[in-house]
Image (tube, helix red, strand yellow):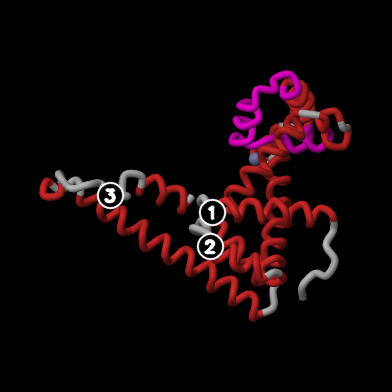
Amino acid sequence: MLQKGKTMAEKIYSIKIKEAFTEKNGCPICALRTLLEAEEIERILGAAMMEPDIRKETNRKGFCKGHLEKLFASGNKLPMALMLSTHLEELEGALFKGGEKKAAAAYGAARKSCYLCGRVGLFMNRLLDNICYLYAAEESFRTLFAEQPYFCESHSAALLEMAEKTLPKKERLALSAALTDCNRQYLEQLREDLDWFCKKFDYRYAKEDWKNSKDAIERAVKYLS
Ligand SMILES: [Zn+2]
Ligand SMILES: [Zn+2]
């Protein structure tokens, strides 16, 4: 059933969720993910870098390729170098202690592990849970939800999965129908734009206007990835 009292963290999530849903510029959950990820990168390269508990975790888990690139792009080179140095120290221990027989498994485990992926995954779970909660609890949020341009493919799947786990049937079906309405309209328009984009390569349409089709491929890629 619906959660009754909300913790401080959940209230903070609710504020961020409502702000993102008010933007109405692309998938609101993509925007929230980008925001939370940027906040977490700033945190671990800032004060949290000196916290022993967090440092222990980053030493043990390391980072995936995408997150290493984002950490590097942030420009905070000294904290990053300090963090990587102690991570490499721990990694050497893990990779070489088991001898040749365990080397492949140790490299495989290191490659799959990422501190930031773990944190972002945790946040996303709380966010999706909170979106479902707000949908069931607040009429004004239901209105805002229905006004979204679209929900990208992966976040549609994640949100429906969370609704399945946390909402009673009536609310779950209402959320699913609202999400479907947003995406149906968006995809119909997107397909129309893609078709027009293709037609523009036919000499008969060469002189016609591009209409809204110039960035149709980019929009399709964004929706699908
Ligand atoms: Zn998304
Ligand atoms: Zn990662």
Residue at x 62%, y 43% (from the top left corner): 34
Number of numbered tags placed on the structure image: 3
Residue at x 72%, y 34% (from the top left corner): 62
Q: Residue 206 appears at what percent x and percent y?
A: 15, 44
Q: Kindly identify which residue carries mark 2.
A: 147
Label 1 secondary element: loop
Q: Kindly identify which residue carries mark 3.
A: 211
Residue 44, compared with residue 32, is above or below; it is: above
User: Which comes sooner in the sequence, label 3 or label 1?
Assistant: 1
User: Which comes sooner in the sequence, label 3 or label 2?
Assistant: 2
Residue range (magenta) = 55-80
Disc 3 and disc 1: Cα gap in Å? 22 Å
**Location of residue 101 (image quadrant):** top right
Q: Residue 126 appears at what percent x and percent y?
A: 73, 57
Disc 3 and disc 2: Cα gap in Å? 24 Å
**Location of residue 214 (image quadrant):** top left
